[in-house]
Amino acid sequence: MKKIVWLISIACMAALGVTESGAQTWTNLGSGMSSAGYALAFDASGSLYVGGDFTNAGGLAVNRIAKWDGTTWTNLAGARAGGNIYELAFDNSGNLYAAGGAMIEKWNGTTWTNISAGIDWYVYALACDSSGNLYAGGAFTTIGGVPANFIAKWNGTTWTNLGVGMDFYVEALAFDGDGNLYAGGSFTNAGGVAAGHVAKWNGTTWTNLGSGIHGGGALDVVKTLVADRFGNLYAGGHFSTAGDVDAYAVAKWNGTTWLNLGSGMDYSVNALACDRSGNLYAGGEFNMAGGKAAHRIAKWNGFAWSILDSGLNNSATVLICDSSNNLYVSGYFITAGGLAANYIAKWAVGTTRAVEDYDGDGKSDLAVYRNGYWSIYLMAGSVLYDNAGPWGGAGCIPAPGDYDGDGKSDLAFFRDGYWSVYLMAGRMLYDNAGVWGQAGCIPAPGDYDGDGKSDLALYRDGYWSIYTMAGNILYDNAGVWGGKGCLPAPGDYDGDGKSDLAFYRDGYWSIYTMAGNVLCDNAGPWGGADCIPVPGDFDGDGKSDLAFYRDGYWSIYTMAGNVLCDNAGPWGGKGCIPVSGDYDGDGRTDLAFYRNGYWSIYLMAGSVLYDNAGPWVTGWTPVQ
């Protein structure tokens, strides 16, 4: 038991969660807008552009389009000729295109220009490729004087058609990472090929995606498309089947097959967006997602649907995610999560970072420790330290964490009440400082006050002591929360950006949040006497999940109430040490283990990163 406790104490250094997340909350964008937005787009600097039918944004008079820089609304220079805006897109030169009714306008930063003279009907969708070409879809059959059935390409000077085009309206466009263009809408034929409301253009030829999407009756339509960074395409709209599977209002194409996303929605999906972690957000007119009450907005983590607080009080029309995984949504609502948010809101996911991330790239790195010497191999492909030291010694327990809040894990260790912390910024924070703790205490650093910095924390036989980097004592030998034989397993179980007090014993879990709530009190059994708890955010929802490992088998129960794995394996075996971490930087904890210098990592994205790779110094101990 002593050996297991020692190994777990090391795993606990990073709250056993390998990611630390900020609170997820709805926020407004100032005073919002006077009416709904229908289009969202980011420029290269990260400013958000909104188009719609509004004439006021943040108290400023505007002509259906405005810019939000994170704090302030501004108008766009120049006079527009068009009316309501239904779609926006930036090309790689920074030109902004806006589609409104039977017109497409280009804004170069100072001047608006109509580029769609001769168009005969409405434009509903825009998308730009990596070469700067603009693609437009809609209800038109002529554009720029060129016959083009419902879809066309603009190369900066002229319009061309895409073969014979479609037989009816195009309402959604999206590119995948390989440059393929996908179109969705009300059509059933693309390029002369039967295509059930969705088709793919490879630059020369249209192809269908199996039998496509159907089942919405006369209102069959794909309203929105989005591709994730893993090559999957998601479609949303008004339908009930995709390929040969039931798929209500939303479906996934993995390149060969259509898949449903649980039981889907109870009504139409108007908009989809993917964040960099691979999470999918859906907005629309629905009130149920995956059988759960979810008012007009919901999140799919690859396994299950979850809600975003109390949702929206009216329908969502458009979604977009920024580079930090925050979600922006516009529509007909005036409240989001009960917060006043006139027609536009932001779902802020907070700061999520991988711990054991020594270079700050968002990925956990391979690190081992032995008698004061450190070796760290970065996931970026370089060696940070190779047997560097001495920094520590025999009897010291490594306790890495981000003690200065710079996004990088720092070298730290604890011995009999004394702490030493060497920052990756190149200076010493503590050198044998104390006394804070004593022999027999298990260090359990985490961000207990939510300031983005790991705090000094200790656990012993049910009693907790926490000294924050802000200089405050949160607890001084407070308890009893746990007891002899319990293993501390702190993590952010409620997603508020603060590590919570938690412990595990023989399959039973107890969690006391820093918000003052008891999430679990000796709940179980979920595990057993010889299982090792390895909580982490395995589904990417910003909350640590209950997980344990036993001789190569993994079980994960999420805080959203789903079982991701139940004694799944083998992935590991006897003598292997679980070293879960976010090794690909997608915001999800991955399954990993270490054995005598060899590493194996199975990503939650579904691929094997390492399979018994090494050796990377044998006879050492991983510091996760």
Image (tube, rainbow, N blue to C red):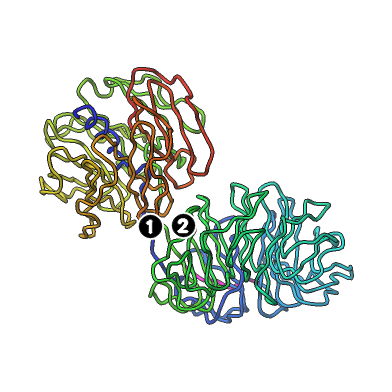
Position of 293 compared to 278: left or right? left
Q: Would you say residue 116 sits in the magenta stretch?
A: no
Q: Say if 78 sits above or below 153 in the image.
A: below
User: In the image shown, does 52 or 597 lie closer to the viewer?
Assistant: 597
Q: Main secondary structure of the magenta part?
A: loop
Q: Which mark is residue 304?
A: 2
Position of 481 compared to 71: left or right? left
Distance of label 2 from label 1 (alpha carbons)? 8 Å
Mark 1 lies on a secondary structure that is loop
| Residue occupying image coordinates x 68% and y 49% | 256
Residue 449 drawn at (x, y percent): 25, 53
Q: Is residue 208 visible?
A: yes
| Residue occupying image coordinates x 28% and y 50% | 499
Mark 2 lies on a secondary structure that is loop
User: In the image shown, does 69 or 8 lie closer to the viewer?
Assistant: 8
Segment colored magenta? 72-77
Q: Say if 620 sits above or below 399 in the image.
A: above
Residue 198 drawn at (x, y percent): 71, 62
Residue 446 drawn at (x, y percent): 27, 44
Residue 315 drawn at (x, y percent): 52, 76
Residue bearing mark 1: 560
Q: Amino acid at mark 2?
A: Ala
